[in-house]
């Protein structure tokens, strides 16, 4: 008996999995992801990069198939997917799976755009998001992301497979379009042939593209599904070993078995982390610990003489700590000093952190000079052990020391708020609703915000996703 190929298994899984097969937890996770991602996209549209994206696609025009958030402009589905996917990552406040990368920003906007065009139900949208996220994550996680250097330092590999998310987009939209298994295999092939190339140096702080052009990834996946439905063909075995697709993503190996292991049993969307701050995931715990001290001790910005962040030695730690004078939205998202300054200034976590008047405020910049980092080599093995056993890490020993008024306050932790599976860190529904309100404020009115929250909360009951899209516009 011939074993089914990996491409076959993934294509058939996407097309045969009905909404009713999804675990209750996965349905809830999918709705939380939809809420969080749309909130991030709404806020991202107001950034400089978001305005450029919207201007580009609005100028190009096209068939009025789907709605651009906030403005209500009608554009082709691929165009709104392009704009919303990049905007959702603009502030770096979107979810992050296993401290590796983002998948929802690529998957959620195209699903909502095409559900609007097709008049799909809320259940169809939820299933498409859960399945698209799962495929994107499974293919991406099959390739190494972190490695342990000869110096026993954990570092990101030189090139990472962010663009592999395109397979999740093609899967989700292929499902919505009712592709056959053969067409879905071709959709994967078209997506692979269309997706942007990988590039090194994922911490491109000063670039609006940051570490990936999610706009182009989403658009490539959307076009792949539509073309496959038309009859366009490509390699129907792209994800199989003899094709070595992973080389196109800059990886040096691929664990093929992991792509289909526990398929339908383990849903990776349940394991992703939510960010409660618009900063890179490794900075979140620093903000948590500083906020804990700042609030418990009733401190003010003027009281603080020095802030010391202690963490295992790594390139990431150094770059986050040394970015003490961010000048752009992208730089702010990677600056621990800027995030701490925003907390000390009492500015709510959200789009306001990236406003020019806050980025260039002299008093805030002066405050940032009071922060520095100290490497703790003795803590490094905790991270190394996790990477060597599972390819990634969730716990990072971190300590924040605040000196104020002649006193010293210390807080220690290993996992930031937003990580799932732990009652002490899991983001609550109330926290995610509050985050959505903060991010959507000023983009849509208060009644629309409440309506959108309500519509997503009971999305499985919606006969047509267009009601939600109307609220988001």
Image (cartoon, rainbow, N blue to C red):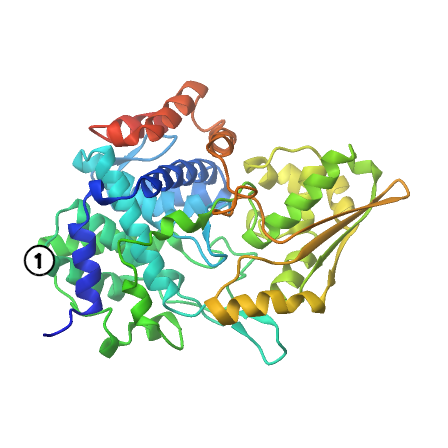
Q: Residue furthest top?
A: 447
Check disc 1 and report the residue beneath it. Answer: 231
Residue 349 falls in which quadrant of the image? top right
- Tell me the element at label 1: loop
Q: Is residue 64 visible?
A: no
Residue 473 falls in which quadrant of the image? top left
Q: Is residue 64 above or below residue 419?
A: above
Q: Is residue 226 visible?
A: yes
Residue 373 falls in which quadrant of the image? bottom right
- Looking at the rendered image, the quarter that the N terminus falls into is bottom left
Using a 10 Å C-alpha cutoff, classify the residue at mark 1 as few (fewer than 14 neighbours), some (14 to 19) or many (20 or more): few
Residue at 52% x, 68% y: name it.
387
Q: Position of residue 238 (x, y in %)?
A: 22, 69
Q: Is residue 400 above or below residue 55?
A: below
Q: Position of residue 89 (x, y in %)?
A: 45, 47
Q: Position of residue 460 (x, y in %)?
A: 26, 32
In the image, 281: left or right of 224? right
Camera-side residue: 371 or 420?
Answer: 420
In the image, 159: left or right of 378? left
Residue at 21% x, 39% y: name it.
124
Residue at 58% x, 48% y: name it.
416
Residue at 61% x, 65% y: name it.
382
Camera-side residue: 86 or 454?
Answer: 454
């Amino acid at each position: 008996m011939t074993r089914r190929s990996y491409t076959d298994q993934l294509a058939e899984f996407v097309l045969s999995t009905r909404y009713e097969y999804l675990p209750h937890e996965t349905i809830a996770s999918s709705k939380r992801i939809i809420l969080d991602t749309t909130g991030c996209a709404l806020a991202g549209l107001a950034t400089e990069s978001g305005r450029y994206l919207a201007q580009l696609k609005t100028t190009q025009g096209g068939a009025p198939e789907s709605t651009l958030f906030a403005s209500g402009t009608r554009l082709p589905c691929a165009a709104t997917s392009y704009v919303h996917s990049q905007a959702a990552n603009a502030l770096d406040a979107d979810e992050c799976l296993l401290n590796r990368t983002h998948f929802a920003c690529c998957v959620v906007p195209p699903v909502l755009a095409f559900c609007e065009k097709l008049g799909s139900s809320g259940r169809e949208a939820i299933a498409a998001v859960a399945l698209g996220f799962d495929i994107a994550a499974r293919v991406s996680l099959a390739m190494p992301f972190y490695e342990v250097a000869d110096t026993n330092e954990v570092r990101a590999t030189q090139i990472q497979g962010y663009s592999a998310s395109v397979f999740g987009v093609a899967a989700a939209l292929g499902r919505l379009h009712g592709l056959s298994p053969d067409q879905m295999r071709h959709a994967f092939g078209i997506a692979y042939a269309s997706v942007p190339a990988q590039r090194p140096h994922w911490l491109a702080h000063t670039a609006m593209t940051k570490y990936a052009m999610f706009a182009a990834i989403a658009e490539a996946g959307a076009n792949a599904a539509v073309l496959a439905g038309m009859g366009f063909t490509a390699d129907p075995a792209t994800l199989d070993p003899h094709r070595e697709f992973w080389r196109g993503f800059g990886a040096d190996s691929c664990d093929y078995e992991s792509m289909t292991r526990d398929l339908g049993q383990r849903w990776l969307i349940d394991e992703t982390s939510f960010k409660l701050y618009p900063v890179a995931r490794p900075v979140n715990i620093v903000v948590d610990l500083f906020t804990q001290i700042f609030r418990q001790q009733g401190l003010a910005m003027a009281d603080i003489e020095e802030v010391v962040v202690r963490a295992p030695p790594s390139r990431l730690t150094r770059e986050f700590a040394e970015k003490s004078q961010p000048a752009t939205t992208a730089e702010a998202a990677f600056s621990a000093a800027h995030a701490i300054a925003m907390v000390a200034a009492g500015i709510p976590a959200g789009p306001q952190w990236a406003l020019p008047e806050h980025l260039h405020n002299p008093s805030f910049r002066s405050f940032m000079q009071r922060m520095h980092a100290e490497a703790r080599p003795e803590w490094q093995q905790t991270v190394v052990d996790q990477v060597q056993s599972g390819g990634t890490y969730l716990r990072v020993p971190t300590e924040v020391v605040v000196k104020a008024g002649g006193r010293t306050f210390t807080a220690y932790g290993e996992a930031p708020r937003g990580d799932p599976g732990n009652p002490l860190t899991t983001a609550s529904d109330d926290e995610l609703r509050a985050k959505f309100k903060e991010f959507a404020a000023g983009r849509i009115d208060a009644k629309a915000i409440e309506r959108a929250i309500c519509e997503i909360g009971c999305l499985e009951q919606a006969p047509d996703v267009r009601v939600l899209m109307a609220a988001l516009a």
